[in-house]
């Protein structure tokens, strides 16, 4: 029988992995619009989401407010 704590930890680690915006966000972005792109975000995940947008669309301008970094 599997250790319940190890099983739950494995489930948690996998959920965090697949929820990473670098892995999941680009599939939901529309094609990059023409002209200037401004990214605005607030909250714990906003920095990583803004980073994922820049990876998908290239450099953008904007402001992201988050607790860290």
Image (cartoon, rainbow, N blue to C red):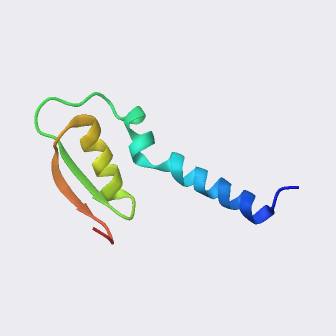
Please give left or right for residue 40 compared with residue 19 in the image. left
Residue that appears at 41% across and 32% down = 27
Which percent across, then down, holds residue 15? 58, 51
Q: How many marks?
A: 0
Residue 66, percent across and down?
A: 31, 67
Q: Is residue 69 above or below residue 13?
A: below
Q: Quadrant of the N terminus?
A: bottom right
Where's the C terminus, which quadrant? bottom left
Q: Is residue 12 left or right of residue 18?
A: right
Give residue 48's quadrant in the image.
bottom left
Query: Percent from the top left, x then y, of residue 35?
Result: 11, 33
In the displayed image of the protein, which residue is found farthest to the right? 1
Residue located 32% across and 45% down the image: 52
Asked if residue 2 lies left or right of residue 38, the reply is right
Q: Is 24 on the left-hand or right-hand side of 30?
A: right
> Among all residues in the image, which is located at the extreme bottom?
67
Q: Quadrant of residue 59?
A: top left
- In percent of width and height, residue 10 lies at 66, 55
Q: Residue furthest left?
A: 35
Q: Quadrant of residue 30?
A: top left
Q: Nearer the viewer, residue 5 or 53?
A: 5
């Amino acid at each position: 029988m599997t250790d319940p704590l190890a099983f739950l930890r494995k489930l948690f680690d996998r959920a965090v992995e697949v929820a990473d915006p670098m892995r999941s966000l680009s599939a939901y972005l529309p094609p990059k619009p023409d002209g200037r792109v401004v990214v605005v975000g607030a909250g714990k995940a906003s920095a990583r989401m803004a980073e994922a947008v820049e990876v998908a669309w290239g450099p953008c301008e904007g402001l992201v407010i988050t607790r860290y970094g």
